[in-house]
Amino acid sequence: MSWAVEEWKEGLSPRVLQKIHELESQVDKLKKERQQRQFQLESLEAALHKQKQKVENEKNEAATLKRENQSLMELCDSLEKAKQKISHDLQVKESQVNIQSGQLNSSKKDIERLEQELKR
C-alpha cells in the first residue's frame, strides 16, 4: 500500500523530491515533538492535579486544626472559670472557718470565764 502513497511522486524532479523528503522529515519531527509536548503537558497536568489535591488536604487539615484550637480555647476558658469559682469558694470557706474559729475562741473564753465564776 505504501507504493500507492509514493505513486504521486513519480515523474517529479530530484530537487522537488528532495524538498518533499525534507518536508516529510520535518513533519515527522514535528509529530514527535508534538507527542513529547503532549506527554509533558499530561505530566504537568498530573503534577498540577497532585499539587491541587495536596493544597486541598492542607486546607482541610488547617480547618481541622483551627476547629481543634477553638475547642481547646473554649476548654481553657471553661477551666479558668471553674478555677476562679473554686478559688472564690475556697476564700468563702476560709472566711467561714476564720469566723467559726473566732466564735470558738470566744466560746472558749466564755466557758473559761464561766468556769472561773463557778469556782468562786
Image (cartoon, rainbow, N blue to C red):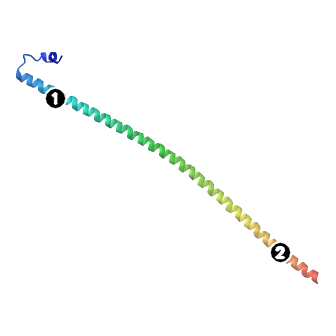
Residue 94 occupies quadrant: bottom right
Measure how far apart labels 2 and 1 are at the Cα level: 117 Å
| Mark nearer the N terminus (2 vs 1) | 1
Q: Quadrant of the C terminus?
A: bottom right
Image coordinates for residue 21, horizontal then vertical, percent: 12, 25
* Picture residue at 28% right of the left edge, 33% below the top: 39
Q: Is residue 69 left or right of residue 25?
A: right
Residue that badge 2 annotates: 106
The amino acid pointed to by label 1 is Gln
Q: Is residue 31 left or right of residue 101?
A: left
The amino acid pointed to by label 2 is Ser
Residue that badge 1 annotates: 26
Q: Is residue 86 left or right of residue 18?
A: right
Mark 2 Cα shell of 10 Å, populated few (<14), some (14-19), many (≥20):
few
Q: Quadrant of the N terminus?
A: top left
* Picture residue at 32% right of the left edge, 37% below the top: 44
Q: Is residue 36 left or right of residue 82?
A: left
Residue 9 occupies quadrant: top left
Q: Is residue 23 above or below residue 61?
A: above
Q: Secondary structure at mark 2?
A: helix
* Picture residue at 9% right of the left edge, 16% below the top: 10
Image coordinates for residue 26, horizontal then vertical, percent: 16, 29
Tell whether label 1 touches label 2 (CB within 8 Å). Answer: no
- Observer-nearest residue: 112 or 43? 43
Image coordinates for residue 110, horizontal then vertical, percent: 87, 76
Image coordinates for residue 117, horizontal then vertical, percent: 92, 81
Q: Is residue 50 above or below residue 71?
A: above
Task: Name the disc covering residue 89, or none.
Answer: none
Q: Is residue 1 above or below residue 69?
A: above
Q: Is residue 68 above or below residue 100?
A: above
